[in-house]
Image: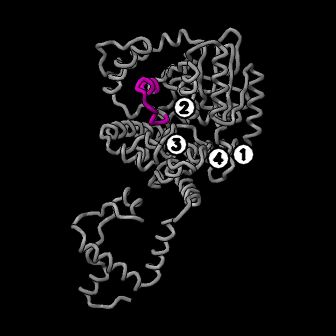
Amino acid sequence: MPKFQKNAKEQLGNEQLRKNLRHATGTIRAKRVMRVSEVPEWEDLRLAGEAIKNRTLRHLDRYLVQLEESLTRAGATVHWARDAAEANAIVVGLVKAKGVDEVVKVKSMATQEIELNEALEEAGVAAWETDLAELIVQLGHDRPSHILVPAIHRNRAEVREIFLREMKQYGTPAPEDITDDPAELAGAARRHLREKFLRAKVAISGANFAIAETGTLVVVESEGNGRMCLTLPETLISVVGIEKVLPTVADLEVFMRLLPRSSTGERMNPYTSMWTGVTPGDGPQEVHVVLIDNGRTNALADPQGRPALRCIRCSACLNICPVYERVGGHAYGSVYPGPIGAVLNPQLRGIEHPIDQSLPYASSLCGACFEVCPVRIPIPDMLVHLRKEVADHKHGVHVEPIAIGLAGWALSDRKHFEFVEGMASLAARVLPNTHHLGPLPWPAAAWTRARDLPMPPQESFRQWWRRNRGEEQK
């Protein structure tokens, strides 16, 4: 994909997208503020969440070994995957070994990250998304644009059209007289998915948390589709990032208070599913857990980048971000959009590609993302760190050092500064009368294409002072 600046410019032209985002993020923000205000010890919870995650990351090797031992003891089979290709090969192999041509899926960022659906499709296996928002995205042949609400860029009328057009091609159709009422849309999705739940032999999930102490995996959700996937099929395959580990069940308590309020603005999520390996006669009788790295150890090795692995995928930083609210998630070119995506993607994928080089600049550095983050990830500091990494990585002529050098020359001497002021005033008198300058020619082109540069005044303060006071400035 092209870099963020080009994607963002295209998305800014979509007025319906901006309207949808403004309404959705504003609603979620208001609910979050209300629920957080009910917890007087909220900041203590944030500090506790940060401390637990930091301790886990410091000893991640030890906790991963403990998790594997606990899972194996509970009857699950553990697989290790270094990257997306290896993880996909493992999952596809497990699915093909069961002799099925379809699977049902719980909403999972990890499986989207490794593009598992595409790998399964290439192998002749249909992967049915069962989360309502993910179903909308899948039926719309679209891509997710939000961590928590993947179809946040769609409104109810658009969803109705998608359901009417697409559902009949893949299963139970939507009623012809369906309206855009949310209850009717949810009912159509329920009927469409029910047959898939009942016939599925294999399910694929992610996990919000993995408890090293017991080998327990945890999924939190709002609709109940996840529980259908986790209990009905004969085989369950869970794809889990290695950073999702928590040491003990007691640690989970902190995050079960932080996550719902930060994500959906609820006191607690409607469904919390926890499973520990295989239970004879109850639920899936074959459980596989695929632990994936896919760049996470690269982030772990960077002391300044490591805090990104504390992320619990609540999306609070997206909902507060003024940049995300205006351009949406597709501009970021990844399943992880918004402020967390701007720091996480370059660490997982590297900064060789133009879009990953551009993401650290997809921010105003206002700091709101840190203020709402339930685990206190210092995203603004990390963005500055990554900007330096990108600048050091660039080859050829660097405009930034030249610009800084010229600014240093201008600010080093009063006469130099007055000369620059005089040139700016001259330019203001020559240029057309307007509030701001348009894109300037190279080398300032890249900077001014994305910013409104104010028109310099026709008279500087120093010139005004001399004209009105007749005194020489010192």
| Foreground disc of the pair 2, 4 | 2
Look at label 2 and name its amino acid.
Gln
Q: Which residue is mark 2?
A: 112
Q: Are marks 3 and 1 in contact (CB under 8 Å)?
A: no
Mark 3 residue element: loop
Residue 313 position in % (x across, y down): 54, 37
143 in magenta: yes
114 in magenta: no
The earlier-in-sequence mark between 2 and 4 is 2
Residue 37 position in % (x across, y down): 46, 41
Q: CA distance from mark 3 to mark 4?
A: 33 Å
| Foreground disc of the pair 3, 1 | 1
* 406 on left or right of 93: left
Look at label 3 and name its amino acid.
Pro
Q: How is the image coloured?
A: one colour
The disc at residue 40 is 3
